[in-house]
Image (spheres, rainbow, N blue to C red):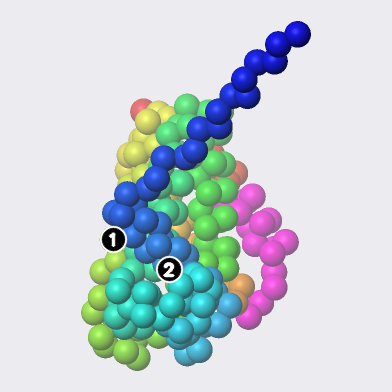
Amino acid sequence: MSRRPAAKVKSAPRRTQAERRQATRESVLKAAMTVLVEDGYEKFTTTRVAETAGISRGAQENYFRTKNELIVAATRYTLTQAAAQARALAARKARSTDPIAAFLDNSRSFCFSPTYLALMEIVSVSRRHAELAKVNTPVVREFRNVLDDIWIDALCAAGYERASVTSLVKMTHNLLRGMAFASAWQSRKAEHLKMLEDWHRIAVRELKRV
């Protein structure tokens, strides 16, 4: 009985230099956010980021030369990823039975994440560091508007009236930012969840259909 020749295993296509550079850059940005979460701004060093990313300090400096440049790039990368996730979820849930719940859950998950608390620290630090504020504040403001617009458009697509939706989304995000800030020194998760349940009931009752 003759044996069939073993099938050849196809090797993965080699990445281009541009793809390798992009992958390394993303590794550095993810490592930077990890270090921010674990160490905070004051103890943040580019050396530790390079170690976390598994590359040399010199290789990292090919992408980001200063601490602030790296922090701002990591902030933009992280917020861009969060916006992409929100956009995908909003598109799926716009026609669901309870798009308001999806909006609240997505916003709560992000605002209570360790990453968001690290970003809040950078915003706070920016008040004392003019150069950091100059480059970081526009990024944060841009994302705030983007996230608002994603959910405003999604809830309007679900049939709610734009003016009431706009008010709800902006109030919700401000509410969650306050909760997230308080959670930095107070552990009241159960209380916060109860407040959001109440907020959900209010939103369902008050939002107007077109």
The type of residue carrying mark 1 is: Glu
Nearer-the-camera pick, 53 or 186 = 53
Evaluate if marks 2 and 1 touch, with contact meaning CB atoms under 8 Å apart: no
Magenta-span inclusion, residue 128: no
Residue occupied by mark 1: 142
Q: Position of residue 29 (x, y in %)?
A: 42, 67
Mark identifier at residue 28: 2
Q: Which residue appears at 66% of the width and 77% of the height?
A: 186
| Residue shown at 44% from the left, 54% from the top | 82
Chief secondary structure of the magenta span? helix
| Residue 5 locus on image (x, y percent) | 62, 20
What is the quadrant of the N terminus in the image? top right
Span highlighted in magenta in the image: 185-199
Determine if residue 41 is in view. no
Task: Quarter of the image for the C terminus: give it.
Answer: top left
Q: As shown in the figure, which amino acid type bears the numbered disc 2?
A: Val
Q: Can residue 127 be seen in this view?
A: yes
Report helix, strand or loop for mark 1: helix
